[in-house]
Image: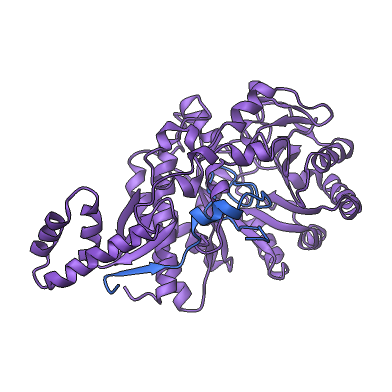
Amino acid sequence: MIHQYQLNGYNIVLDVCSGSVHVVDEAAYDLIGLYESCPRQEALAQVAAKYPGIDPQELSECYDDITSLKDAGKLFTPDTFASMAGELKARTSGVVKALCLHIAHTCNLNCSYCFASQGKYHGDRALMSFEVGKQALDFLVSHSGTRKNLEVDFFGGEPLMNFDVVKQLVAYARSIEKEAGKNFRFTLTTNGMLIDQDVIDFCNKEMSNVVLSLDGRKEVHDRFRVDYAGHGSYDKIVPKFQDLVRQRGGKDYYMRGTFTHHNPDFLNDIKAMLDLGFTELSMEPVVTAKGDPSGLTEEDLPIIMEQYEDLARLQLERYKEGRPFTFYHYMIDLTGGPCIYKRISGCGSGTEYMAVTPWGDLYPCHQFVGEEKFKLGNIWDGVTNTEIQQEFASCNVYARPDCHDCWARLYCSGGCAANAYHATGSVKGVYEYGCKLFRKRMECAIMVQIAEKLGDQA
Amino acid sequence: MKHIQTIETRNLCQSAKNGGCGECQTSCQSACKTSSGIANQKCENKNK
């Protein structure tokens, strides 16, 4: 399977199964499009008629080049990976390498668009105790097999509402990692309200990554991200985020925004973040229940698509000006990205990745917490609901019929199980709206890579 | 091939031979938390 598209002056051809990327002129673009559906002479005649200025001999050579690329496994490569789809998960069955610790099911903001229902996940407010967290870390170490790198996210709600336990758990993890032959990588996601110098010093020493929630423009941010009295949080948190990032010393961070039906023109929010001095940016489409007035609509779609293209162009402009920034979804490493096993195995939720509630229950991921039927077990007894775990273990790109004909399937690995479940009632469905956005992001991301590699000749 | 420029990429078919170490990050962890993409992840295989 190939995928052809034109963007920002480039004619781009992706060979889906080999991962090859080709930039071609218009005649080659058309010839490649006709290659599998037309006999050689007919394809050449059609293209020659369209481009009378090109020597037919040259077109014929171009056709031969296409054949050479096909023979070299760089065009029209067949999909031979289906039988490997369950292999990685089977090989690593029972291995857990990442936990999302719900350290605080409570929040000091009251954002109505929060998928975690203001941190409570449709349940009671709760804080994780050190004992529960310690057991979770022990569970992770003892189930991690030969994995060296273990990922732990401090998530909520607002994790800094339970900061003392975060600190104790990191100290505990550091005290056991050497002997256990492990390397803990911590991430903390925060709304910023409780950031002070102590938090900054701790995070910049211990957290491999911090995710800082900021929606962009002040009026956009303050529409949803308000305290319980209804006051916007922007003025309070922005200076704190700036302090933290300034002192971060080059370690990873992301400003993580959410855009909704109220700001499909989210590029203005990205620009607002850049104006504040932030350069590592993530901007996510809101995930809401059906009927929520902030949910993205079909009418928003063309605007969003255009915004993604404009964002790609902005990234290239700033790159050329020596003022680069990173957009999380446009980070794509064409030469060093994931292997095919990773690309077909699905996201890992419910198998190698699980979420832990404040009271120690295990769920397939943070987005399933509070959905009782998805409870997998707990950190003392391990996974006991093997039926649900099996459902997630068998979730891969080939288990989703809707993905079979999608060119982007090896870039998304079948998509988010939670989004699929909420959209279709099945973790093996697809959230088509999200797919449309994903495909556009990948087209943009690959174009940016091409432009940077070719010196933006278009 | 003056009509076609091929960009250097990792060959996915080749990666079937020495891939699958599992050391890479879990898919949606680092920033988004509400969608899944694997294309932007780093390969951590030391033997590739």
Chain rendered purple: A
**Near-viewer residue (A377 or A34):** A34
Left/right of residue A231 with respect to residue A181 in the rendered view: left
Q: Is residue A190 above or below residue A107?
A: below
Instruction: Estimate the x, y position of residue A71 in percent, counting from the top left.
Output: 35, 58
Left/right of residue A406 with respect to residue A280 in the rendered view: left
Q: Quadrant of the C terminus of chain A?
A: bottom left
Give the quadrant of residue A79.
Answer: top left
Instruction: Estimate the x, y position of residue A206 in percent, counting from the top left.
Output: 80, 58
Q: Is residue A125 above or below residue A441?
A: above
Q: Is residue B33 visible?
A: yes
Give the quadrant of residue A366.
Answer: top right
Instruction: Estimate the x, y position of residue B14 in percent, counting from the top left.
Output: 52, 56
Shown colour of chain B = blue
Q: Is residue B25 above or below residue A428?
A: below
Q: Is residue A319 above or below residue A435?
A: below
**Near-viewer residue (A351 or A109):** A351
Residue at 73% of width from left, 40% of height from top?
Answer: A96
Give the quadrant of residue A75.
Answer: bottom left
Left/right of residue A84 with respect to residue A169 in the rendered view: left
Q: Is residue A228 visible?
A: no
**Near-viewer residue (B3 or A104):** B3
Residue at 70% of width from left, 26% of height from top?
Answer: A376
Residue at 65% of width from left, 36% of height from top?
Answer: A90
